[in-house]
Image (spheres, rainbow, N blue to C red):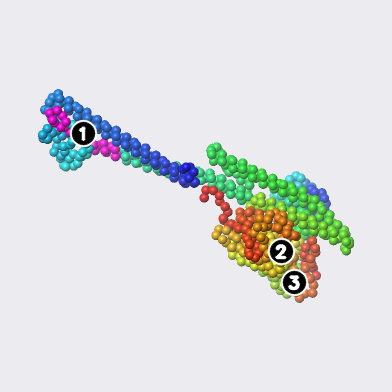
Amino acid sequence: MRLLLIEDDIAIADYIGACLSNAGHEVRQVPEGQSGLVETKNEHFDLLIVDRILPDGDGVLVVDSLRKSGFTNPVLMLTALGSIEDRVEGLRHGADDYLVKPFAQAELLARIDALFRRSKGAFQDVHEYASITINRRRREAWRAGQRIMLQPREFELLEQLVLHEGRYVSKAMMLENVWNFHFHPDTNIVETHMSRLRQKLNAGFASDAIQTARRVGYRLRDDC
Amino acid sequence: MIARGVRSARQITLLFVAGLVIAGVLLGGIAYLVGHDAIRGQIDARIEAEMRSLRHLQKQGGNRALLAAIDEDDERGGSFDYVLVNAWGHRLSGERGHPLLAIGWRDAVFRDDAGNGIPVRALTAPLDDGLRLTVATDTAPAAALLRTTLVLLALALLVLIVLAIGCGLLFERAIRRRLDLMNRTAVAIIAGHLDSRIALSGHGDEFDQLASTFNSMFGRVEALIGNLRQVSSDVAHELRTPITHLQNRLERALEEIPPGSPGLETVDAAIGDSERILSLFSALLRISEVESGTVRRYFRTFDLSAQSAMVVESYSAVAEDKGCQLLSDIEPDILVDGDVELLSQAMTNLIENALNHNGPGTRVTLVIERCEDRVALRVTDDGKGIDEADFPLALRRFGRLEARRNPAGHGLGLPLVQAIARLHQGALELQDARPGLRVTIWLRSEGQQPRVGTH
């Protein structure tokens, strides 16, 4: 994928650039909103990463004018503020997702992945990954054809895993997408429900369908 | 005294109308009395003049001339009636229906030929030769004039009352309109629209003066909150940036250190430390954002019952893992205006506090119920509880109590819950559940946002 990164802090920009290149993306970096807008006019980018505070103004305004000029690809907003107002305004002005600094490399990659996938659209009821099948409308799940009975939160966790097709989903993404929590509770409710989901999903099977990576998140094994 | 007793525009209007009516009645009454006296004085003067001229006639022409003058006047149908009697009480002139009156002024009733009573004003005086003369005049025309005056005065009073009520209502509406404008602006500001200002009428009147004073106050509030926001975001930005650098470096180090080497654990722990710094810092910033009230702009109506049920469902698994029990008693379909995420955060904080501060076997209950026009969000546990004397301490940021109860926590849990309750124009209440702690967030139910002022 071709990504444009608009970020004025060189150390952070370089770090993000390195992360993304390592993950196989092609990255163009610019330090200002204006030059970013010029770049999007001249070249095609699959996804934009825009810092909220830029030397030539608010990143929200960059996204605003980008959207007005007809740019429809996903935009991920970066911010050092992390306030509610900040998030709401960012999303209201056309950002698709919102990541508060500092963030782990895996978190950034998982979100970029999710955004790109979301932009391709996935609206059918039945989804499959490896041996797992879910029906989103009827909220039913199967592993290797065997029906798995799940609680609502457990189903939604599995839904996230299936929709991400074997890529890591971070805890923060689970909190946002399943619980709609943009804060981190003291207790790890993701872990609690994930362990229940894992128990139900693995009962009667030899292999663990879910892989956990510390500080990264959860994903479905492609060989489960 | 009156001014001190007046509380509403309606009362001012009523006082105004009552004052005008009293003034009207007094003025009308005085005008009537003065008019009445003037007309009477005039009648008396005419009678006196007639009496004088008849007396003079008697002195000049004797009794014969007097009688002739009286008879002539009677025949002419003049404006006076006469009764003349001699010293022996013998009636020399005058109709039979006219009574004999004592000396002096009298209001009397004469009867005409048909026997109808006619009110008269009469003066009776002794003349020469022992004669006694009464000169009287019909007062009906004067009475009719006074009656007409009275009717006119009553009509004027009626018009006055109608005008007074009309002016009063207009006045009341004008006051209400101006006050409502101020009220709406203040409510908008409470709701987080800090840039709202009261529109001035441009007349430079008292309301404009008050409004512009309020506007400067609102400007000051906006500037202060703006400062607070600016400082918070500066602090956030300035601190988060170096922490971001630190964490990025640590992550890179984690990748570079070969698996199994001793440095790995240290780096891992350092990442954990920086995460704790961030979580503390996020909690502080969140409290200050919640306290500034700006988030009220994003309030919307949501189903608190459904959201609470979801939180309970999520946390009952957590409670079970800790060997505790999470129960709930949720009245269905309770709607509130607010921030669903912040209230969820408050709920999870309270539930986590109850679970973390007490050992296994603790029973925690979440209750959502309507109490009159308020909604109670209540979390009760049967654990160790807090001494009532320590309640204020529990709500203090970084309170020692919180640190003692939960060494891993940052002591910002309850202060954040309190800030969230206040953001929703509610209150936080701590109670001893004997045993255990009961924490209640009091909220307004949907559509019960405060309306300050004229209502």
- Which quarter of the picture shows residue B275? bottom right
Number of other residues with Cα within 10 Å of mark 2, as a class: few under 14, some 14 to 19, many 20 or more: some
For the point 77% across and 63% down, the residue is: A217
Q: Which mark is residue B227?
A: none
Q: Of marks 1 and 2, which one's residue comes earlier in the chain?
A: 1
Label 1: element kind: strand
Q: Nearer the viewer, mark 1 or mark 3?
A: 1
Label 3: element kind: helix
- Residue range (magenta): B126-148
Mark 1 highlights which residue?
A: B104
- Which quarter of the picture shows residue B14? top left
| Kind of residue at disc 3 | Gln
Q: Nearer the viewer, mark 2 or mark 3?
A: 2
Q: Which mark is residue A199?
A: 3
Disc 1 to disc 2: CB gap under 8 Å: no
For the point 13% across and 33% down, the residue is: B85
Q: Tell me which chain the residue with mark 1 is part of.
A: B
The answer to whether marks 2 and 3 sit on the same chain is: no
Q: Where does the image place residue B442, in percent across and percent down from the top left?
A: 60, 58
Q: Nearer the viewer, mark 1 or mark 2?
A: 1
| Kind of residue at disc 2 | Asn
Number of other residues with Cα within 10 Å of mark 1, as a class: few under 14, some 14 to 19, many 20 or more: few
- The verdict on residue B138 being magenta is yes
Asked whether residue B366 appears in the rendered view, the answer is no
Cα–Cα span, label 1 and label 2: 111 Å
- The verdict on residue B436 being magenta is no
Q: Tell me which chain the residue with mark 3 is part of.
A: A
| Kind of residue at disc 1 | Gly
For the point 37% across and 42% down, the residue is: B158
Asked whether residue B369 appears in the rendered view, the answer is yes
Q: Which mark is residue B356?
A: 2
Q: Where does the image place residue B76, in percent across and percent down from the top left?
A: 16, 32
